[in-house]
Image (cartoon, rainbow, N blue to C red):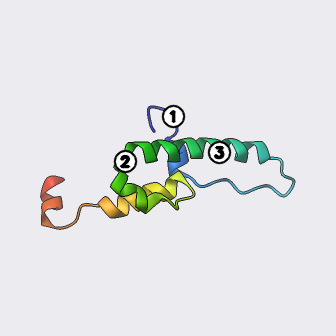
Amino acid sequence: MINLSLFKYVKSMVPPLADDKSNESAIEIWNKKNHKVLSTISLCIDNSALVYIVDAKTSKEARNILKRIYKATGTISIIATC
């Protein structure tokens, strides 16, 4: 996502709609970019992992699910990060 300049969509949530709807086009752009990122994530992961993110509405949600599932734990992970 970094090389596509889309990582900010992975780290953020959809901006709230202003009372006067002045940012409606910005939200539409955000939604399109977020969908692109979510699609790219889905294409880049193994099919066995798709079941975990199939209901994710945002790329941030999908990323957080995958981080939680694949987070290294235990003694070996401590050694591997040194």
| Number of marks in the rendered image | 3
Left or right? Give the position of 56 relative to 51: right
Q: Earlier in the sequence, mark 3 or mark 2?
A: 3
Element marked by disc 3: helix
Q: Quadrant of the N terminus?
A: top left
**Residue 3 occupies which quadrant of the picture?**
top left
Amino acid of disc 2: Ile
Please report contact status of discs 1 and 2: CB closer than 8 Å, yes or no.
no
Residue 40 appears at what percent x and percent y? 47, 41
Amino acid type for the residue under numbered disc 1? Ser
Image position, residue 50 (x, y; %): 41, 55
Is residue 82 shown to the viewer in this render?
A: no
The residue carrying mark 2 is 45
Residue furthest to the bottom in view is: 74
Residue drawn at x 83%, y 47% as measured from the top left:
22
- N-terminal of the pair, mark 1 or mark 3, is 1
Give the percent coordinates (x, y) of residue 14.
64, 53
* Secondary structure beneath label 2: loop
Q: Residue at x 56, y 52 (%)?
A: 12
Residue placed farthest to the front in the image? 47
Closer to the camera, 3 or 82? 3
Q: Residue visible at 36% across and 58% down?
A: 67
Q: Which mark is residue 5?
A: 1
Type of amino acid under label 3: Trp
Q: Residues within 10 Å of mark 2 (few under 14, many from 20)?
A: few
Residue position for label 3: 30
With 34 as the anchor, is 72 left or right in this view? left
